[in-house]
Image: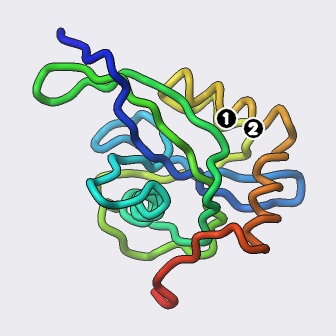
C-alpha cells in the first residue's frame, strides 16, 4: 500500500464543558464504526482552520459553542483512503466550549456521541497519538482548557456567526 510521506493537515474540535471536578469532553464514533474520536475534517480550499473546526463540531457531533482560536495541541496518524493509499495526517485541535446540543444535525444517523471525563477519554479513543494528547491535557489538570475558557470569556474567541439554532 502506498503511503504519501508529506503530512496532510486536518482540523479537529475538542468539545468540552466544565464540571465540578474538571472537564468533560465529547467524543464521536467514526462513520459507521465503533472507533471513538474527535470531530475532525479536511479544511477546504479558502476556508480557515477555525471555521473548519466549528463546522466539523456542528456537522459530526451536533454541538455549537464558542471556539478558541488557539489550538490546545495536535496529533498525527495514518489514514487509509478509499482509493487504496494512505496519507500521514497532522491534526490541529481547537477547543470548543459547548453551549448547545442540536436535536438534529447532519451526521446524526452515522455517528454516536458520548461525553466522558477528561481523565477517562484517552482510554476510549482509536488513535494512540490522540490518546497521548488527551492524557497530556488531563495530566496538567485541564490547565489548557481552563486557559481557553478564560480567553473565551475575553477577546481571543472566534464567535459563531449564527446566533440562533
In the rendered view, would you say 60 is above or below 160?
Answer: above
Residue 79 image position (x, y, % from top left): 32, 26
Q: Residues within 10 Å of mark 1 (few under 14, many from 20)?
A: many
In the rendered view, would you say 163 is above or below 43?
Answer: below
Q: Nearer the viewer, residue 62 or 164?
A: 164
Q: Which residue: 54% across, 21% down?
A: 128
Outermost top residue: 1
Q: Which residue: 62% across, 48% down?
A: 71
Residue 57 image position (x, y, % from top left): 46, 60
Does dot 1 land on a helix, a strand or a loop? Answer: helix
Provide the residue designation for mark 1: 134
Q: In which quadrant of the rendered view does residue 140 lie?
A: top right
Q: Residues within 10 Å of mark 2 (few under 14, many from 20)?
A: some
Q: How is the image coloured?
A: rainbow
**How far, Cα to Cα, is label 1 from label 2?**
5 Å
Does dot 2 land on a helix, a strand or a loop? Answer: helix
Q: Nearer the viewer, residue 154 or 130?
A: 154
> In the rendered view, does 82 fall on the left or right side of 103?
left
Name the quadrant of the N terminus: top left
Q: In which quadrant of the rendered view does residue 7 lie?
A: top left
Outermost front residue: 46
Residue 27: numbered disc? none
> In the rendered view, does 156 fall on the left or right side of 104?
right
Provide the residue designation for mark 2: 137
Q: Which residue: 83% across, 32% down?
A: 139
Q: Are marks 1 and 2 in contact (CB under 8 Å)?
A: yes
Residue 154 image position (x, y, % from top left): 78, 73
- Counting the numbered discs, the total is 2
In the rendered view, would you say 161 is above or below 2?
Answer: below
Name the quadrant of the C terminus: bottom left
Residue 126 image position (x, y, % from top left): 48, 28
Amino acid at each position: 500500500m502506498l503511503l504519501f510521506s508529506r503530512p496532510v493537515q486536518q482540523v479537529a474540535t475538542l468539545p468540552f464543558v466544565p464540571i465540578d471536578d474538571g472537564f468533560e469532553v465529547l467524543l464521536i464514533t467514526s462513520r459507521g464504526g465503533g472507533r471513538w474520536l474527535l470531530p475532525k475534517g479536511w479544511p477546504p480550499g479558502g476556508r480557515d482552520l477555525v471555521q473548519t473546526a466549528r463546522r466539523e463540531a456542528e456537522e459530526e457531533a451536533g454541538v455549537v459553542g464558542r471556539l478558541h482560536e488557539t489550538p490546545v495541541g495536535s496529533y498525527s496518524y495514518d489514514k487509509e483512503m478509499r482509493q487504496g493509499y494512505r496519507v500521514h495526517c497532522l491534526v490541529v485541535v481547537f477547543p470548543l466550549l459547548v453551549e448547545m446540543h442540536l436535536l438534529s444535525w447532519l451526521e446524526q444517523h452515522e455517528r454516536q456521541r458520548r461525553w466522558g471525563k477528561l481523565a477517562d477519554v484517552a482510554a476510549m479513543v482509536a488513535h494512540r497519538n490522540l490518546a497521548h494528547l488527551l492524557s497530556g491535557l488531563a495530566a496538567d489538570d485541564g490547565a489548557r482548557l481552563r486557559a481557553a475558557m478564560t480567553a473565551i470569556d475575553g477577546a481571543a474567541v472566534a464567535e459563531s456567526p449564527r446566533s440562533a439554532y
